Amino acid sequence: MKKLSALSLCALAGAALVLSCEPVEGENVDVSGGSVTVSVSEISAPEEGLVEESAESYASVTGFEASVKVEGGSLKVDVSVLPIVTEPDMKLAVVVVENGIVKSQAFYGNASDYPEIDFNNYVHDHVVRECPTSYTGESLPVEAGKVSSKSYSVAIDKSWDASNLEAIIYTLRTFPASPVQAVSRAKYTNKAGAYVDNVVSVKAGESVSYDFQ
């Protein structure tokens, strides 16, 4: 089954990666339209070990079928999860992002060192707009071979470009009691109690079928 590591999720989830789903005014994006920004903490050596462990040692056990479409003033996200194991503690998370936002980009170095970049008209992708679930997921107990389905609806703000919206959908599993690598997790229980099992991104107007590889 195809899997992306937590680090490849652009700070959506995983050990030591922190996502804010509350409207905040960030320095790097003009949020006059009510955008939401993502903050990422620094990754320590133990936390990085946890991310690598989840990517390398725990095979994905879930596949997705999903569709995302604009209906009236809402974004509809329909998700079906097909597991190959029974997992009472599985969680499902959905985050809606917007791409192609052209705004100024804060830069604290010497901008002249990067003449190829227009910091006044910088294209921001994957700007978080809404979390219809918690970013740490909502409970989705699953049984091997049986499909579990969920539907979500997000009101589209008038400042958003509906055609550039995208849903990031991922499942999370609790780390096993005995990690494969000798990495201490005690200090990071709140951040690293779970890892991303599988993830898929679906743009507005598109759908994906189960992908087992």
Image (cartoon, rainbow, N blue to C red):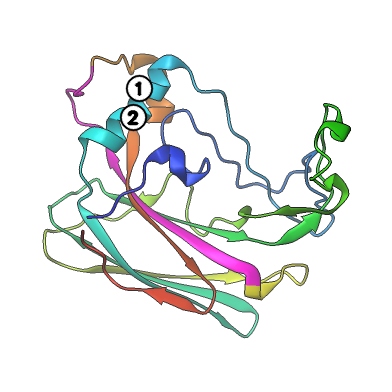
- Say which residue appears at 23% left-offset and 20% top-offset: 181
Q: Amino acid at mark 2?
A: Glu
Residue that lies at the very extreme toward the bottom in this rendered image: 72
**Residues at badges 1 and 2 in contact (C-beta under 8 Å)?**
yes
- Horizontally, is 31 left or right of 146 in the view? right
- Horizontally, is 25 left or right of 44 in the view? right
Residue 15 vertical placement versus 137 (above, below): above
Q: Give the residues drawn in magenta, as a range.
A: 164-181
Where is mark 2, residue-wise? 52
- Say which residue appears at 28% left-offset and 42% top-offset: 173
| Residue 103: mark in rendering | none
- Say which residue appears at 83% left-offset and 31% top-offset: 113
| Dot 1: element | helix
| Residue 49: mark in rendering | 1
Q: Is residue 92 visible?
A: no
Q: Nearer the viewer, residue 140 or 209?
A: 209
Q: Does the magenta segment cover residue 43?
A: no
Residue 66 image position (x, y, % from top left)? 37, 71
Q: Tally the marks.
A: 2
Q: Amino acid at mark 1?
A: Gly
Q: Nearer the viewer, residue 41 or 135?
A: 41
Quadrant in which the N terminus appears = bottom left
Quadrant in which the C terminus appears = bottom left
Residue 5 image position (x, y, % from top left)? 37, 41
